[in-house]
């Protein structure tokens, strides 16, 4: 049942509002056109049970490369 998935996902996210926001964003990104939206949502909640969706590891900014400067001749 989906309520079991929600309670399992709350082990990593303490705020229910934040869980809904993260789940809706993840569902939009992971949804495939020929599948049911309910199945995608359940898959997202299953993923949230095993990992922390709010971790900063996935949101790290790319490392900036040094910019080459042109010199006057």
Image (cartoon, helix red, strand yellow):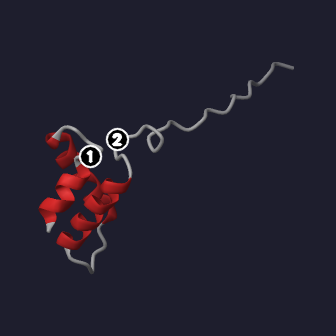
In the rendered structure, the answer to whether residue 27 lies left or right of residue 62 reads left
Quadrant where the N terminus sits is: bottom left
Q: Secondary structure at mark 2?
A: loop
Q: Position of residue 56 (x, y in %)?
A: 43, 37
In the rendered structure, the answer to whether residue 71 lies left or right of residue 11 reads right
User: How many labels were placed on the picture?
Assistant: 2
* Residue for badge 2: 54
* Residue for badge 1: 11
| Direction top: furthest residue | 72
The residue at the point 18 percent across, 38 percent down is 15
Q: Secondary structure at mark 1?
A: loop
With respect to residue 23, does 40 lie above or below?
below
Q: Position of residue 31 (x, y in %)?
A: 29, 67
The residue at the point 45 percent across, 45 percent down is 58
With respect to residue 52, does 64 lie above or below?
above
Q: Nearer the viewer, residue 68 or 65?
A: 65
The residue at the point 48 percent across, 41 percent down is 57
Q: Position of residue 59 (x, y in %)?
A: 44, 40
Q: Earlier in the sequence, mark 2 or mark 1?
A: 1
In the rendered structure, the answer to whether residue 31 lies left or right of residue 72 reads left
For label 2, the crowd category at 10 Å Cα-Cα, with few meaning under 14, some 14 to 19 and many 20 or more, is: some
Contact, mark 2 vs mark 1 (Cβ under 8 Å): no
The residue at the point 21 percent across, 46 percent down is 19
**Front label number (2 vs 1):** 1
Q: Position of residue 71 (x, y in %)?
A: 80, 20
Give the CA distance from mark 2 to mark 1: 12 Å
Quadrant where the C terminus sits is: top right
């Amino acid at each position: 049942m989906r309520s079991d998935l929600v309670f399992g996902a709350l082990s990593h996210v303490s705020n229910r509002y934040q869980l809904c926001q993260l789940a809706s964003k993840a569902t939009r990104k992971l949804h495939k056109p020929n599948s049911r939206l309910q199945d995608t949502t359940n898959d997202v909640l299953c993923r949230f049970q095993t990992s922390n969706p709010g971790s900063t590891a996935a949101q790290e900014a790319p490392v900036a490369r040094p910019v080459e400067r042109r010199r006057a001749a």
